[in-house]
Image (cartoon, helix red, strand yellow):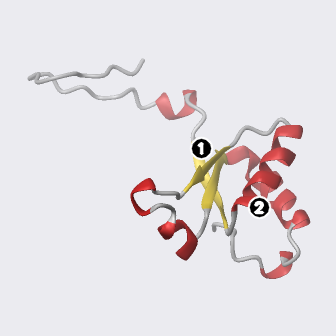
Amino acid sequence: MLRLSYGCSSEQVRPDPSINKKINMNIKILVFNNEFEAKLLDEVLNDKNIPHIIRSYHDSAYDGLWQMQSNWGHLEAPEEFREEILLTFENMSPESPDNQNLEN
């Protein structure tokens, strides 16, 4: 069980080392160039019931300027779905052999 400490305390709280096995950890799998890639892959992964999170790099302070100059965002998912997600993305991408979006 993971215990959280709030406020000041002399007791040092150490998380249970087996917590990583209990929580399905997400990893960054690929980076999107635009919103259309993200939405299309999101629909395909939802149809396949693959758990995932799409994170946009939009920053309201800069009104999306940073997002337009770099990448649109990225996809996170559990490690066990990595290969299936990458294969799905490659199949829907026109530049699949040289795809630079894939995280190594």
What label does residue 26 carry, if any? Answer: 1
| Marked residue nearer the N-terminal end (2 or 1) | 1
Name the quadrant containing residue 98: bottom right
Q: Position of residue 92 (x, y in %)?
A: 89, 64
Residue at the image position 59 percent from the left and 69 percent from the top? 71
Residue at the image position 47 percent from the left and 29 percent from the top? 19
Whether 73 is drawn above or below 54: the answer is below
Q: Is residue 10 left or right of residue 45?
A: left
Query: What residue is pinned by disc 2?
Result: 37
Q: Secondary structure at mark 2?
A: helix
Number of numbered discs visible in the structure rendering: 2
Q: Position of residue 52 (x, y in %)?
A: 69, 42
Residue at the image position 56 percent from the left and 32 percent from the top? 21
Decide if residue 55 is in sight here.
yes
Q: Is residue 16 left or right of residue 18?
A: left
Residue type (three-letter) at the residue carrying disc 1: Asn
Residue type (three-letter) at the residue carrying disc 2: Glu
Q: Position of residue 39 (x, y in %)?
A: 77, 52
Q: Secondary structure at mark 1?
A: strand
Q: Position of residue 1 (x, y in %)?
A: 42, 17
Task: Check disc 2: other Cα within 10 Å, few if <14, some if 14-19, many if 20+.
Answer: some
Which quadrant of the figure contains the C terminus? bottom right
